[in-house]
Amino acid sequence: MTWPKNSPALSAKAIADLNEKFSDLDAQLGFEVTEEFEPFEQKNDMFTRAFWDKTVKNEDSQAFFDSYRMEFAPRRGAGFNQKDFALRNAAWAISDIISGRNEDRGLREGFQSAILNDTPIADEKVAVEDNGAQSKEIKSLAKLFGADLVGIAEIDPRWHYSARVDTREMKSVPIELPTDITHVIVMGHAMDKELVDTYPSALAGASTGLEYSNEAAIVIQLASYIRNIGYEAIASMNDTALVIPYAIKAGLGEYGRNQMVLTPEFGPRVRFSKIFTSLPLIADTPKPMGLTSYCNICTVCADACPPKALPYGYPSAKSTSPSTIKGVKKWSADCEKCFGYWAKLKTDCAICMRVCPFNRTDSLIDLIWYKLATSRFRKLGLKIASSRQKAARLKAKDWWQSIQN
């Protein structure tokens, strides 16, 4: 299907107009967009750079991607043996089918391009008489299909990629989107805590693959429903726009030092997907949650990062990496160090996710700690967290043993 092309790259005036339009919400969410702001070009994300940028593309990065095919998966001990890689790669299987079905067209759906629709838009629209009721209904349906969290944000082109990537030649090409989209439905997908507890390991990578496969199904199903009632809906995962700003705008969480969205329910242990739609909806009104304020005084993730890729101090708009969006005041990782460590492991590393104190249980002590950490008593929360024994990494052999019981 051919969609009308977006307008040309955002001009300085267009960015200024958007900054003014969303100024109150930006301030409330802690977004600080400076005069140096530029929409992000997707070819500069770390994973895409590993295919074309000679400063990133090397034997380690190639081996990292190759390991997602079983015949190239290394076998080197607990957490990285054949069964561990087999489970990780199996967890990715559904996502891989979707992302690989149009490779000959230069489309890696869900990653370097939106997921193509197999469902036409119904000729007749189901009338929406109450946008608020419709919003509640669509959130319930998203959860019916399997989403753990759902929020709605108004469309904000500042966070859209300035160009997508044609994967045949790894070149930038225009993003095409329908012109009538007004809102983004953002869904959160909680990762399995026990698998996350085994990071860093190939076994832990199954927690990532499972949610990408799950969310691929969920966004396709919900988009299909919306199209069947007569409205535009584009299913999207990591493609088309930066999902972190949209998840925050949709009220699902706040930005953390570890570069992740921290949610009240699951901490950073969440993957996000989104649907661009013309369905009449009402955007959620996010409220400060106190999670970012706690991150300002906590450095657990930065302390635990093996390649020392995570920042200390307060958020800043300064960054020298092309993989960091320009002109946004935030915590920014040394992306090259981070991916370099992943490449050496031959799997993803999310130690920063595992050690984050917001990645908690529902025990009474954790509930009390959370109340303190997200309040003006956050320093007391930090003191309590510092005094508690750090959660040890779950050994892969213990995870395998646990599923036999």
Image (cartoon, rainbow, N blue to C red):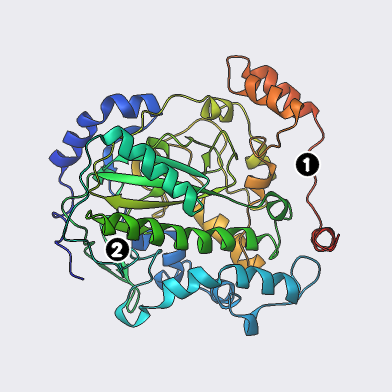
Report crowding for label 2: few under 14, some 14 to 19, many 20 or more residues within 10 A (C-alpha): many
Q: Disc 1 vs disc 2: Cβ atoms closer than 8 Å?
A: no
Residue 365 position in % (x across, y down): 76, 26
From the viewer's side, name the closer residue of 198 and 116. Answer: 116
Q: Is residue 302 visible?
A: yes
From the viewer's side, name the closer residue of 329 and 230. Answer: 230
Q: Which mark is residue 368?
A: none
Report crowding for label 1: few under 14, some 14 to 19, many 20 or more residues within 10 A (C-alpha): few
Residue marked by disc 2: 164
For the residue labelled by badge 2, is the local secondary structure a helix, a strand or a loop?
A: strand
CA–CA distance in space, label 1 to label 2 = 40 Å
Residue shown at the point (27%, 58%) measured from the top left: 227
Q: Is residue 246 above or below residue 195?
A: above
Quadrant housing the C terminus: bottom right
Residue shown at the point (55%, 58%) measured from the top left: 211
Residue 39 position in % (x across, y down): 28, 49
Quadrant housing the N terminus: bottom left
Quadrant in the picture for residue 234: bottom left
Residue marked by disc 1: 391
Q: Is residue 245 visible?
A: no
Residue shown at the point (29%, 51%) measured from the top left: 276
For the residue labelled by badge 1, is the local secondary structure a helix, a strand or a loop?
A: loop
Residue 274 position in % (x across, y down): 38, 51
Q: Does 53 sit left or right of 199 as displayed?
A: left
Q: Amino acid at mark 2?
A: Arg
Which of the two discs, 1 and 2, labels the residue nearer the N terminus? 2
Q: Amino acid at mark 1?
A: Ala
Q: Does 90 sit left or right of 236 as displayed?
A: right
